[in-house]
Image (cartoon, coloured by chain):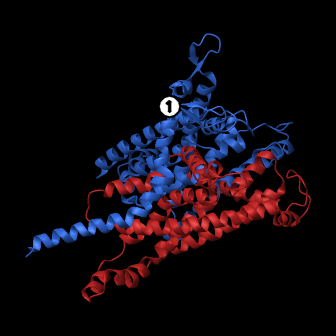
Chain colours: A red, B blue
Amino acid sequence: MANFSIKHQPGFTAIAATCFVVLYLPIIVLVFYAFNAATSTSEWGGFSLKWFQSAWQNTQVIDATVRSFQIGSVAAVLATIAATMAALATTRTAAYPGLTFKYAAINQPLMVPEIVTGVALLIFFSRIKIFTGYSGLGYLIAAHTAFCIPFAYLPIRARLENMDLTLERAAADLYATPWRTFRRITLPLLWPGILAGLMLAFVISLDDVVITEFVKSGGQDTLPTYMLGQIRRGITPEINAISTVFLLLSVAIVTLFFFISRKRD
Amino acid sequence: MATAEQVAKEAERRDVRTRWLLSAPALIIIFLAATGPLLIVLVYSLLTPGAYGDVKWQFSPEAWLSVFMERDIFDDTLSLAAAHVTIFWRSIKLAIVTTIATLALGFPTAYFMATRSEKTRDIWLFLITIPFWTNLLIRTFAVLQIIRNEGIINTILIKLGIVSAPVQILFTDTAILIGMAYVYLPLMVLPIYASMEKLDFRLVEAGYDLYASRFQVLRRIIFPLVRPGVIAGSILVFIPAIGAYVTPSVLGGGKNMMLSNLIELQFGQGRNWPLGSALSITVMIIVMVALLAYVRNAGRAEVRHG
């Protein structure tokens, strides 16, 4: 028993290794076949970029991508502003009446299965559509903003709770107005949290399938709902190519997020 | 003249008011585009279906009856709706098996991550976070390409001569199960890892000093201490699994419906919005029961270790 390690558990390392391989293998295969020259995804026909090219020339793909970005950026910004204000209102305070209610209300979208929210919004928005005659992107933006708020709220609140009150008290002692204190002290300190919240919200909006699928009107496909439609119809390597670009984008944002939220000062 | 006490009270009142104003936008958006519409679903579940979708404003308990029952078209008698019961059973069964499968794989993975050195831990965490934030549809699609008849699994099996014809995995319950376990695994690993990271290994050492076996240490020391993480992970997997839409749509094909597909059907070809609403609320109730069980369990775990 010379090398007795208290941390060893039989088989655990093997299972963990399997998990990591299994998590990444399908994604690697998917990316690999995006560079396939063959028309079918079942055989390898040599290296080619033609599916990326064909996706790039597919106006439906481009339209859906642009729409995804429009909805994602507007919803993420709105959600982050609302979440920042809500985080300021719910942290660094003694318990006050309504605080628990606010926590519950803000996290509510996380507790309800997406399909239920999707159905609820379908019904609600279809009424409003009849009533107002408006059928633009506003509905999708409203829906995305709502379910992005709890995600944006998480890192902002975490950051606020770890922030020191001393500097703000010092500013107040030096006759800074509350707004000036916020602008010059709180906001710069909170910035990494806000940025992390914004990126999280953007990724969440970009990834959404279910709620978008139920809320969208005709011709309002986002990239994920467009892809779902294509996959249901049958697959070509073009979907692999789109997925590959999408994956790269997500990985880039996640990497950025990871480093921003890990950075401690 | 106001006393100091009055001034303090007034300041506090003003602070609370500011805090309500600050949280108002978030609360209003969530109420309008998430919480509020759920109440409308409840109302819709009690109305009569319209001929072309939507509803007629006429009370009817029919939707709730047809969640589990069906009316005989000839003599109007009620009997158990076999199709709905099958779908409910499949959804609950698949959600539970997915939770167990991800736990069986995720627990050792989280343990492995938590026992690495401080420096490398971040790398493993990063590796598990990437799939967590990459699009669920893309990951489901990746699974589809692996398990279909021309996919890598069947190709290898045939090349090795283990099977002569491809094994049909796609469009079965097994496919949905594989897909859900795959996409939800990070949701299980992350909370367990969060508990495991705080684990005090001196307790483990003490266990070995007292002649505990590896398994006894795992069962009597490690598992009870990370139980909150295990419960949180299970709930995080179970809730999206019971309402899963993308995975069964892509991997289950048309026949192997889960609850969400049944709900979607009512708002599409089925043109029975009240039934779709009643089914949605039923899914909500299942989720709420699971959440309540979680809250009670988490509370108990805290009492024991607090």
Could you tell me how many numbered marks the image carries? 1
Residue A6 appears anywhere in the view: no
User: Where's residue B75, x and y in %?
Assistant: 61, 10
Residue projecting furthest to the bottom: A174
Q: Nearer the viewer, residue A102 or B254?
A: A102
Q: Residues within 10 Å of mark 1 (few under 14, many from 20)?
A: many
Q: Amino acid at mark 1?
A: Leu
Compare residues B5 and B154 and report the one nearer the observer.
B5
Q: To which residue does mark 1 refer?
A: B46
Which residue is drawn at the image coordinates 48% and 52% (left, top)?
Answer: A109
| Quarter where residue A253 is shown | bottom right
Kindly identify which chain the residue marked by label 1 belongs to: B
* Quarter of the image where the N terminus of chain B is located: bottom left
Q: Position of residue A16 (x, y in %)?
A: 59, 54
In the picture, measured across the screen, residue B66 lies left or right of residue B135, that is: left
Residue A182: tell me if it is visible.
yes
- Tell which of B210 and A8 is nearer to you: A8
Position of residue A117 measured from the top left corner of the image (x, y, whole percent): 54, 47
Residue A249, compared with residue A144, is above or below; it is below
Q: Secondary structure at mark 1?
A: loop
Q: Is B14 rendered above or below residue B32?
A: below
Residue B292 located left or right of residue A261: left
Residue A75 or B186: which is nearer the viewer? A75
Residue A194 position (above or below residue A111): below
